Image (spheres, rainbow, N blue to C red):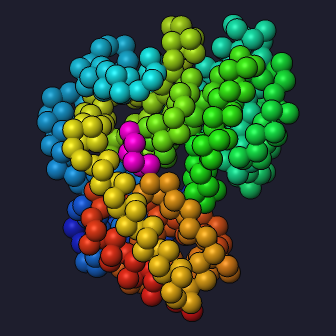
Amino acid sequence: MAVATGTATHFDAPAIERELYMRTFARQPITLVRGEGVRVWDDTGREYLDFLAGVAVNALGHCAPAIVEAITAQASTLIHTSNIYHTVPQLELARLLIDNSCLDRIFYANSGAEANECAIKLARKWGKLHRDGAFEIITALGSFHGRTLASLAATGNRHYQEAFDPMPEGFRHVPFNDLEAMRAAITPKVAAVMLEPVLGEGGIHPATVEYLHGVRKLCDDHGILLILDEVQSGIGRMGYLYGYEAYGIEPDVITLAKGLGGGLPIAACLAKEHAAVFTPGDHGSTYSGSPLVCAAALAVVRAILDTDLLANVRAMTDHLHAGLKSLQAEGDVGISEIRVSGLWMGIEFDEDRAGAILDKCRNDGLLVNRTSANTIRIAPPLIVTRDDCDRFLDIFGRACAR
């Protein structure tokens, strides 16, 4: 086997993985070695249009100049210090995120699951202090909150949980977009409701405006916290810096990750003052909020706030949605539903064809994702252009044809 390098030298990656790696991923049969903008190249030199963006991570595309410049400069200055000391990029990012939100305090993490763990711990301590020891958290069936034990227990899908039973206690799951079910689940033991504004891993199922407004009112009426898991829906994905802005409500706590670092691992838990109940020693992380990842995140957030990127997200959302609806109406493609939340779409088919369609797309130079046997998910970079979208529609339309 050839040794992996940064060049396009081909080597047998699947064989190396079978020999060395824990079998946790069902990888696609390509090895990517280079990326630029909305395109990537494999080790044979083949080009692909990337409409998954590292699962909604590469917000500014691959190797965005602003990010490359930021991390190059930071890497030559200061990479890591731990949270024993102050650093400038960490505090600048905190100011930028807080000043442009309805929240007051921040804690950095390294992944979405860790950010959700932070929110879960906040809710439990808040329940001890303000709700007579309440510790339960209500989440939605079909949700996904992470793969640590607590975030997995919060997840509303037994498929992810069964191999690791028993799950930690303290989580109640109710149907999504069902306000009466939510109302019935609230008891004196409940400290918080934790929801994704859009069920991402469940296949892009958006909450209705009426539902989230109703949940906000229920939380206010019962004196409990509303936590929004914006690991995927935040950082411009829905055409707003934060997903909650699309719904016109204010949560007590939100969690961010995915697009925040533009490709580097950073996450955050933001809370209003009344919910930020941690004191020194309650929580921590060795790597979180390092100068390097915060420099990258600063480049991402500044690009969103200081350019027309959000306008592009909205325009390209409309263009893609119109193209997919036209494809659905005009061709024998079997599309039964198109669910849209900004540049984040779930395309459901009337038969279990998602795997075959994914393979056809990849073979024709397009990278997409499937969330179930009959649902394709796309999440292109926020910089995607009209030409990119038209190229996607052409390849995807041919892949869907029966």
Q: Quadrant of the C terminus?
A: bottom right
Tell me the chief SS of the magenta region.
loop
Q: On the rendered structure, is 217 left or right of 63? A: right
Q: On the rendered structure, is 204 left or right of 158? A: left
Is any atom of residue 20 visible in this view?
Answer: no
Q: Position of residue 85 (x, y in %)?
A: 32, 13
Q: Measuring 49% from the left and 46% from the top, which residue is drawn there? A: 232
- In the image, residue 388 above or below residue 327: above
Is residue 228 part of the magenta span, yes or no? no
In this view, the residue farthest toward the front is 210
In the image, 270 versus 198, the foreground residue is 198
Q: Position of residue 55 (x, y in %)?
A: 45, 56
Q: Position of residue 130 (x, y in %)?
A: 70, 8
Q: Measuring 74% from the left and 56% from the top, which residue is drawn there? A: 159
Is any atom of residue 239 visible in this view?
Answer: yes
Q: Which residues are magenta?
A: 236-241
- In the image, residue 287 above or below residue 43: above
- In the image, residue 92 above or below residue 42: above
In this view, the residue farthest toward the bottom is 402
Q: Quadrant of residue 321?
A: bottom left
Q: Position of residue 149 (x, y in %)?
A: 68, 37
Q: On the rendered structure, is 93 left or right of 237? A: left
Q: Measuring 25% from the left and 77% from the top, which residue is drawn there? A: 45
In the image, 242 versus 18, the foreground residue is 242
Q: Measuring 51% from the left and 87% from the top, which residue is drawn there? A: 330
